[in-house]
Image (tube, coloured by chain):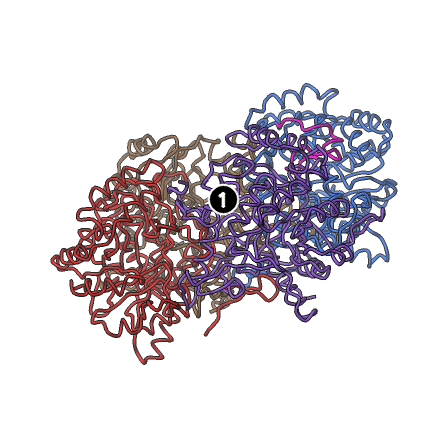
Chain colours: A red, B purple, C brown, D blue
Amino acid sequence: MPVRDNVEIGLNRFARRGYDLDEVSIVPSRRTRDHDDVSTAWQIDAFRFDIPLVTSPSDAVVSPATAVAVGQAGGLGVLNAEGLWARYDDPTDVLRRLRQAAGPDSGPPTALLQEVYAEPVKADLIAARIKEMRESGVTTAVRVSPQHTVSLAPTVLAAGVDLLVIQGTIVSAEHVTTTGEALNLKEFIADLDVPVIVGGAADYQTALHLMRTGAAGVIVGVGADSWSTADAVMGIRVPLASAIADAAAARRDYLDETGGRYVHVIANGRIETSGAIARALACGADAVQLGEPLRVAAEAPGGGVWWDSVAAHPRLPRGGTSAPVEPRGSLADVLNGSAESADGRTNLFGALRRTMAKTGYQNLKEFQRVDLVLGGNGAAVAGPGHLVG
Amino acid sequence: MPVRDNVEIGLNRFARRGYDLDEVSIVPSRRTRDHDDVSTAWQIDAFRFDIPLVTSPSDAVVSPATAVAVGQAGGLGVLNAEGLWARYDDPTDVLRRLRQAAGPDSGPPTALLQEVYAEPVKADLIAARIKEMRESGVTTAVRVSPQHTVSLAPTVLAAGVDLLVIQGTIVSAEHVTTTGEALNLKEFIADLDVPVIVGGAADYQTALHLMRTGAAGVIVGVGADSWSTADAVMGIRVPLASAIADAAAARRDYLDETGGRYVHVIANGRIETSGAIARALACGADAVQLGEPLRVAAEAPGGGVWWDSVAAHPRLPRGGTSAPVEPRGSLADVLNGSAESADGRTNLFGALRRTMAKTGYQNLKEFQRVDLVLGGNGAAVAGPGHLVG
Amino acid sequence: MPVRDNVEIGLNRFARRGYDLDEVSIVPSRRTRDHDDVSTAWQIDAFRFDIPLVTSPSDAVVSPATAVAVGQAGGLGVLNAEGLWARYDDPTDVLRRLRQAAGPDSGPPTALLQEVYAEPVKADLIAARIKEMRESGVTTAVRVSPQHTVSLAPTVLAAGVDLLVIQGTIVSAEHVTTTGEALNLKEFIADLDVPVIVGGAADYQTALHLMRTGAAGVIVGVGADSWSTADAVMGIRVPLASAIADAAAARRDYLDETGGRYVHVIANGRIETSGAIARALACGADAVQLGEPLRVAAEAPGGGVWWDSVAAHPRLPRGGTSAPVEPRGSLADVLNGSAESADGRTNLFGALRRTMAKTGYQNLKEFQRVDLVLGGNGAAVAGPGHLVG
Amino acid sequence: MPVRDNVEIGLNRFARRGYDLDEVSIVPSRRTRDHDDVSTAWQIDAFRFDIPLVTSPSDAVVSPATAVAVGQAGGLGVLNAEGLWARYDDPTDVLRRLRQAAGPDSGPPTALLQEVYAEPVKADLIAARIKEMRESGVTTAVRVSPQHTVSLAPTVLAAGVDLLVIQGTIVSAEHVTTTGEALNLKEFIADLDVPVIVGGAADYQTALHLMRTGAAGVIVGVGADSWSTADAVMGIRVPLASAIADAAAARRDYLDETGGRYVHVIANGRIETSGAIARALACGADAVQLGEPLRVAAEAPGGGVWWDSVAAHPRLPRGGTSAPVEPRGSLADVLNGSAESADGRTNLFGALRRTMAKTGYQNLKEFQRVDLVLGGNGAAVAGPGHLVG
């Protein structure tokens, strides 16, 4: 196993130095290119997308309808098969309650999330949601947790998803249990007809092991958006730039080991601006998984409020919830429209195209080689100017 | 003596680079495990605990009654034998005065602390408190300062404590004095029948020397909670991750030197969340000493206010006092109950169990080998969400 | 190509460590000098200046009249040939609208900037502005963008500028296009009679390539003032101290390669105080390009408001706008007058002269060798004192 | 010349890494000691002091009367021979004007400082002030600037000072001038009968050269208190821990080169708490020069307001002024009295004594060898507790 720089934090106790996305940035060098000549296309298995976007399976931003809208805008929408749409016939009222429980400076209370997610998941609702998405003609994907993959998979597959996303905060290819009921990812995936995206993983080794399960894509990162408290609650932190680069190394080694199987690396965690998207891809990701940035879309089911699914955990919630924001345009505007402000929160993929042009790269695979710089003033949000609106 | 990385801060003047707990974090890697299969048990000498918790001997959080409650919840409560319970027949009024002197944004004034701690310590009160705790059946421990160990020990031992904690901000095995009255730790401990926990120590050498006194456990850290001003007042700072790892190295070397005596390393200092507990153990500690985190328990004698004993020093106080917080549940809830918020302040040891499960470790000793990462965004408290309540 | 220190951020993925201007500072060492014996003179091609100042081509600070005032104060004013003065017969009303749209804590909205810059550029207005500046007798310079250089150059040259500034946020000597209409900088400059300043560049290689086009000066930096959001929008950041030093290395190598052609390095980006000017020159720059610092001059066309031209981009604005500040004196006062406050915002070049004296250097070329220190408290703006006024 | 670690900030451009006092701290190790057995005594030339304190020559904290009070409390008070007491028969009114011009959150305006310091210095007033101080029996010292040393020295020496302090922000042993009137420090000091303290110096070489002039003490640091804007105005910054250690190396080398002349290193700059005093001495200083910390004394002439002399510079002020603070006790209390709060602002030298005891050192010379650690949470001012009062 290759090993990155190790720091001796105490006598004979070492820690790898990790870097977060906001510590690195892109250096223009040598060449520029017309931005009309740049492609942001991404293809995984048989599915092709105009933009390298996978959504987080958060009920705050993905309903069946918005999953379709994401597909129509060029990305991949992922509905949570264990979320509110799988628990309630019509979750509109629940979503409204959550929205109304938010104050101007605070999101809905954790206890309310815990309450509404206590409603059981129903198989027929999952099937109905998948059907609704399929009928639109977009590529269809849902997320299941590793714990419920075995029980929910038959429903999900029968309903006809194109891609299956098996996602927990932390997933390994080797789950030890004394009850003997754990999911064997390798056997499970080998038997499937649809490609699987699996994660999150946090290091080279876990990423490599997940690739060896036969997955088409591996999610890197533990879903740690800005509201995540994985650090405070569990002492777990994943410096994402390093984790992406390590997973990209696993992709390279696995490609070599298999003589040509290319498993996609999908970056997840605190990617909130177009600049962060560009940096994640520059570090070696093939696509990004976005949740919170989509809440500014007018169609967002949460009405501008944000919560990640782990924020609703019944015994150990690991994320806060956000106060609502005003909509900034349609989902299509947020992803590809002209920006009316300069904060990197709209025209997310138009900005990516321009970054690629300004650094002279034609496609995403080449762009993974762009020069990086570590350090510098990270004024992600600028001074006392007019940024929003 | 082994030496960690040294930095030349000026010509021929070196400083070791030290790391604090919030600079490191835990990396999940490769394996996961059912959290029901994980044990957080800790045993020191003949005493076994369900959770690796020793309380700080602060009157703000430990009365005889709460020491018993801690014991019943699986940890070790330590009463201060030089605190208010040893100075007043009934300290209830004093505690109420301190609580009422706190404002919404400020704790009780230093001068008031100095006043109430000017009342002399009474031997008979110490004996009575120990008796009260013993009768509950939990493991009984009190703390004495190095200065008063010789005079108070007979009382304490006669009253029948199970474990004796000799704790000052900084304790060495070699105290130089011209008055000739200093405690000789080695001789003192050799003559005792009860096991001793001693500290705080800040480096490899002091930890090793304290181990050689025959102590069963060594406290690492100088009690520097977030209200400590040891840095401003004395220029002293103990980057705790490094100090723990150094003390763990001393434990290893002492184990080898004695052919098998295992002295426990107990980490103390700014450990305020379940995440910090996990990190301290991951750096090599056998247990953690917690004070301030217990003030959110409904039973906390200080009523939500916090002060460390050094904040009451008559001539050179080295700590502030905190404004009160609202209770977050019973002591048992805070330690092991389900969390209704995501800030790492409740279900402290349930969270530890989950971290161990997500990283695949079965017991605390194995968990000391978990992978660590240095760096990354340390958003210990998350964004503008709903975290408390 | 020489390579600076590389950090392995992940397995086999490297990033150069870059330093910003505020991370370095100047160390007085050994010698001091009378400040009357110090010269801040700068000469590029046949043009000599008392102070090493090139203005940013921002309409907020440069009108034809202020360009003349800058020239009379000893520097080089650069008018934007694609700015408001080239779009409106009399932009006074437009400037007033922008000023009035600013609130006490916010600058004019991005949408308003986009609106007023939608008015087309007119060749006759450009010619008239250049004529007005020429008549004052100062050295005359205008800025064109790389995209419009071919179309605007005939007008600009016919009107008789002394220096042509070709400036975009990022400019390369090798622009790839499939439409075949790109500017070939090398051919274009070879055919010109006037010297050209070109940029911005962000690394050694781009700077070297731009020097090889025949330019007289290369701008280093991507115009990232404090209101820039290049980082949030594009993931691009240029740690300026490193970029300047790299460009200075390119200057040295190009000097050697040509046997004596000295191309000037002009630093651009978040240079806001006299201290930052000194640091930029100390890192190897021959001159600094200043925009925002000039807005405190009574003559500033924006009336104290600041925006960089990229803030008005129709589809992807990359900068905010500032709330207005009170004037601090005339342009001459700001550049060379006595300071009535201690914040490094007035007497910009008098302060430079004093720094050179306190470190014992007689002229700018020697001063590029001054000792630097990395680190230290960067209290660029001091404590709760009286700094402004 | 020895060279500390160099960082390549850009190609072939290097900067030494410097550390500030608040980046290092003291590590207790191995031994402790009774604090009654510790001595903080300091002796320079024939003069012995109980505490290693030299005051800054700031009118905000030093009048003839307070210089005497400092002497009586065990330190060395230094009056500014070019300050208000040398410009006005009775500066009481001027001091009151400055105090009254301060608001609750701001100090007196720079322009007012410039105005009151425009009054000329009078030789007879200097003589009278020195006489007043001499009569009290304390060691007497005044400060002159390098520029006025030649003209003021006869007056000062005739009046009978014990120690002469020649201090500017930056002083070198080699001042280059074309007017030929510069002070030759070496010749000047050789001819003097009284010992000289000279500075500030910022690096090894300048310190060594100043030692070779025959000075008894060298001041390290450029007077950069928290209100200093040397960084913003001049781009100059002196990471003090490194500068002290470098100067201590010069002291060692000069001691060797002369076969035994020991020149004292006096640290100056942002030393505001007892913790910072301990750190400065631990880095190698023999004494500290304090200004701002003394303004909390009831006797402070500025009435709680603070300004350094460079804040009054007529053309290039380089420091702000502070809002007033409430007095915290007498000068003797601030230096040696019991502390009633925990912020390191009172009992400054009692705290130093305790730090020395907790780390086992008996005198200041031994204490210069104490272990240092780099890093750690620098919570110089603690959490939301009750710290002041």
Judge the density around disc 1: few (<14), some (14-19), many (≥20) Cα neighbours within 10 Å.
many
x and y, in percent, of residue A246 in the image: 41, 67
Q: Residue at x 49, y 38 (%)?
A: B298
Q: Nearer the viewer, residue D41 or C185?
A: D41
Prevalent SS, magenta region: loop
What amino acid type should be assigned to the residue bearing mark 1? Leu
Q: Which residue is mark 1?
A: B331
Q: Is A250 included in the stretch rendered in magenta? A: no
What chain letter is assigned to the residue under label 1?
B
Q: Nearer the viewer, residue D332 or B166?
A: B166
The furthest residue to the left: A135
Q: Is D329 included in the stretch rendered in magenta? A: yes
x and y, in percent, of residue B210 in the image: 71, 58
Can residue D239 be seen by looking at this rendering? no
Q: Is residue B226 above or below residue C372?
A: above
Task: Indicate left or right for B5 with A307 as reference.
Answer: right
Magenta span = D325-346
Q: Helix or strand or loop: what does disc 1 sit on?
A: helix
Q: Is residue A154 above or below residue C373?
A: below
Q: Nearer the viewer, residue C213 or D367?
A: D367
Quadrant, the C terminus of chain B: top left
x and y, in percent, of residue C126 in the image: 29, 43
The furthest residue to the front: B135
x and y, in percent, of residue A135 in the image: 11, 58
Quadrant, the N terminus of chain B: bottom right
Q: Is residue D33 above or below residue D69?
A: below
